Image (tube, rainbow, N blue to C red):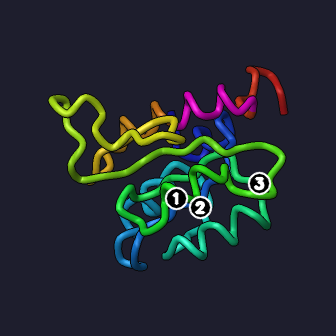
Amino acid sequence: MENAVFSKNYPLTILVAENGQDATSSAKSLLIQLGYQPEVATSSQEMLAMTRKKTYDVVMADVQIPDLDRILASQTGGSSRRPIFIGMTVSDSADTGGGCLRPGMDHSICKPVDPAELSLQLQACSVLSGTRRIRGEK
């Protein structure tokens, strides 16, 4: 599937939250390649502020971001619709049983992010959030 077509078939508003600007470049670059325009938060405070101002379909957050548990517990504060949370970590592997999946997280993905795995997760998120385009819709 062409990248521009992917984001049109699976439209999502996405926030990427990691510690430091450099850390977000890989996930953000892959999302851009898929045709998305992700927004970036480089701290837990910025992530919380952004999710209170705007409703996101998906929040991809580094599980090591400070205060993440508190943010997940608040389910992003003032939003009427909770985003789907994808936890990102370098320590997630098959033998940990999804070790980075924390209470409040819906999915997990290992870093470096695999483009095929990211695509599958975004497809699932689009279906769950109700944003998936039905064939023939404009």
Q: Which amino acid does label 2 sit on?
A: Pro
Mark 1: secondary structure: helix
Left/right of residue 128 with respect to residue 59 in the rendered view: right
Q: Which amino acid does label 3 sit on?
A: Thr
Mark 2: secondary structure: loop
Residues drawn in magenta = 122-130
Q: Which mark is drawn over residue 55?
A: 3
Q: Which mark is drawn over residue 89?
A: none
Quadrant housing residue 126: top right
Q: Residue 94 at what x, y percent from top left?
A: 19, 30
Q: Main secondary structure of the magenta part?
A: helix
Of the two numbered discs 1 and 2 on the same chain, state the one appearing first in sequence: 1
- Do the residues under discs 3 and 1 have CB atoms within 8 angstroms? no
Q: Residue 60 at what x, y percent from top left?
A: 50, 53
Q: Which amino acid does label 1 sit on?
A: Ile
Quadrant housing residue 104: top right
Quadrant housing residue 96: top left
Q: Give the foreground label among 3 and 2.
A: 3
Q: Residue 42 at what x, y percent from top left?
A: 49, 76
What residue lies at 53% left-to-right and 37% top-to-bottom?
122
Q: Which residue lies furthest to the bottom in this view?
A: 21
**How many marks do you count on the picture?**
3
Left/right of residue 92 with respect to residue 55 in the rendered view: left
The residue identified by callout 2 is: 38
- Do the residues under discs 1 and 2 have CB atoms within 8 angstroms? yes
Q: Which mark is drawn over residue 32?
A: 1
